[in-house]
Image (cartoon, rainbow, N blue to C red):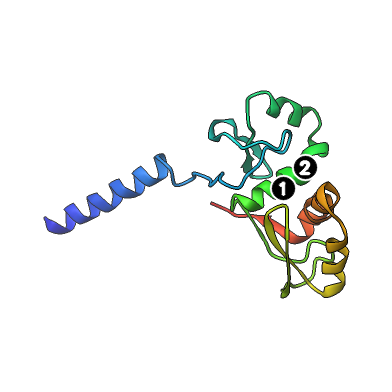
Amino acid sequence: MKTRAVISLAIATLLTATLYGADKVNLEKAKCPVSGKECAADTGVDYKGAKVYFCCNNCPKAFAKDTAKYAAKANQQLVVTGQAKQVKCPLAGKDLNPETKITVAGTDVCFCCNNCKGAASKKTGDEQIEMVFGDKAFEKGFEVVKK
């Protein structure tokens, strides 16, 4: 009898976590890829097997109209929210060297060597975001975390 109660409690806990928040994303550091403002949890749209979030319900329309324009910032948001993780150098696609870590748009990024780190460090603002999180770089260096 006691075993059944423990199993039932475990199942109930698992179902509750699945239905009410296991998939919640931390939007604390996330910025809308269209406006740059804080994101709202109810504005998420599917993107690359995850969700990208916006500040309002108008921004997803602009994003859908010209996804390529906002892709680097959307990719960066996937990383900052923990929906994607870095697995390789975004510039060369090689193994990471933790000693090359820099912060790009509030996100820690490592590279394979000091040459790649130097190239990224020379860029600033949107150019740096595009270099490190643009679609080609994202494909080389990051992967969406499977749930």
Image quarter hosting the N terminus: bottom left
Q: Three-letter amino acid code at disc 2?
A: Ala
Q: Position of residue 141 (x, y in %)?
A: 75, 61
Q: Residues within 10 Å of mark 1 (few under 14, many from 20)?
A: many
Label annotation for residue 128: none
Q: Position of residue 56 (x, y in %)?
A: 63, 27
The answer to whether the residues at label 1 and label 2 have Cβ atoms under 8 Å apart is yes
Q: Residues within 10 Å of mark 2 (few under 14, many from 20)?
A: many
Q: Is residue 124 above or below residue 118?
A: above
Q: Position of residue 117 (x, y in %)?
A: 82, 68
**Front-lying residue, 49 or 52:** 52
Label annotation for residue 71: 2
Residue found at x 83% / y 74%:
114
Q: Three-letter amino acid code at disc 1?
A: Asn
| Residue occupied by mark 1 | 75
Q: Quadrant of residue 20?
A: top left
Label 1, label 2: how far apart the Cα atoms are? 6 Å
Residue found at x 86% / y 50%:
127
Q: Is residue 102 above or below residue 76?
A: below
Residue found at x 75% / y 27%:
62
